[in-house]
Image: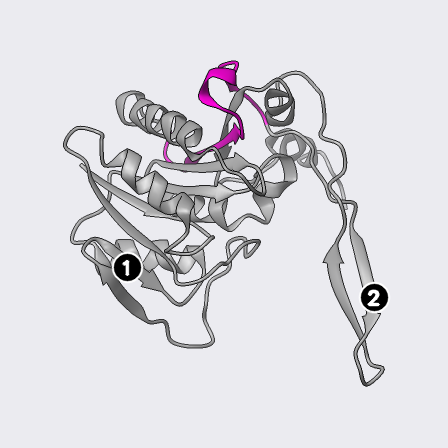
Amino acid sequence: MLILVSNDDGVGSPGILALASTLSKIPKAKVVIVAPDREQSATSHALTLQRPLRIHKVRENCYSVDGTPTDAVMLAVNSILKKKPDIVVSGINNGANLGEDVHYSGTVAAAMEGAIMGIPAVAVSLVARSDFYFKTAQFYARKIVQGVLKYGIPAGTALNVNVPNLPLKQIKGVAFTRQGRHSYGGVIFKKSDPRGQPYYWIGGESNPLEETLGTDCRAYLDKKVSVTPIKVDLTEYNLLEKMHQWKF
């Protein structure tokens, strides 16, 4: 069984090393890391089209790509690996990918690229900015990946997993959830450089998480691991049915 591991925090990040280590303990699993050579957070599903890409073999079964997470997965499947992987697992991300975060996340994009190729995929994030409990995320990452391999998921689907940054004994279980709401307020900071020219910095504190039952955000607030199935197909089918009645 071949497991492709990627991320958006870089090929040497503690999270990806922890993920590869725990997945290698799955019986008969071969784990290959192919990831960006540096941090590529919030690159979403970007592809590098304006310059050539380079692959560097870091060590056995570990490669870096000087591009985005999507570049890394695409090159892994089409150029590096000798056969199609059985699953793509992205992470362990340093930070949350709750609610709207999935639209910006390079971690989620790496998993979704696998889903686009028809490969089962999982994105794993640890909801923290420091003092990471990687052992907790490792435990649930391995369990969920084994679940996907056992039960399967539909083509064009990935699982977005968010793990509270707590000791394993403090986790209250696993919740299967839908995407909630988690925005950052759209704050733009305007400053001036030494020459008096304006520049802008996107930032701001996160708004409070949505507390609605059944969402990934609520699961996190309840100290549960959220597992949210997300799809490549973005069609809003209910609206599509109504649009057939539109007249121009």
> Any magenta on residue 125?
no
The image quadrant that residue 15 belongs to is top left
Whether 242 is drawn above or below 202: the answer is above
Whether 170 is drawn above or below 160: the answer is above
Residue at the image point whose x is 37% and y is 55% from the top: 12
Mark 2 vs 1: CB contact within 8 A: no
The colouring scheme, among rainbow, by chain, secondary structure or one colour, is: one colour
Is residue 98 found left or right of 35 in the rendered image?
right
User: Circle 1 is placed at which residue position?
Assistant: 63
Whether 86 is drawn above or below 177: the answer is below
- Badge 2 marks a residue whose secondary structure is strand
Residue at the image point whose x is 58% and y is 20% from the top: 223
Location of residue 28 in the rendering, given as x and y in whole percent from the top left corner = 14, 32
Is residue 137 found left or right of 105 in the rendered image?
left
> Any magenta on residue 162?
yes
- Badge 1 marks a residue whose secondary structure is strand
Cα gap from disc 2 to disc 1, whole angstroms: 39 Å
Q: Which residues are magenta?
A: 154-178
Amino acid type shown at disc 2? Lys
Q: Quadrant of the N terminus?
A: top left
Location of residue 61 in the rendering, given as x and y in whole percent from the top left corner = 21, 53
Amino acid type shown at disc 1? Tyr
Location of residue 21 in the rendering, given as x and y in whole percent from the top left corner = 28, 39
Q: Nearer the viewer, residue 159 or 166?
A: 166
User: Circle 2 is placed at which residue position?
Assistant: 190
How packed mark 1 is, by other alpha carbons closer than 10 Å (few <14, some 14-19, many 20 or more), is many
Residue at the image point whose x is 65% and y is 29% from the top: 180
The image quadrant that residue 43 belongs to is bottom right
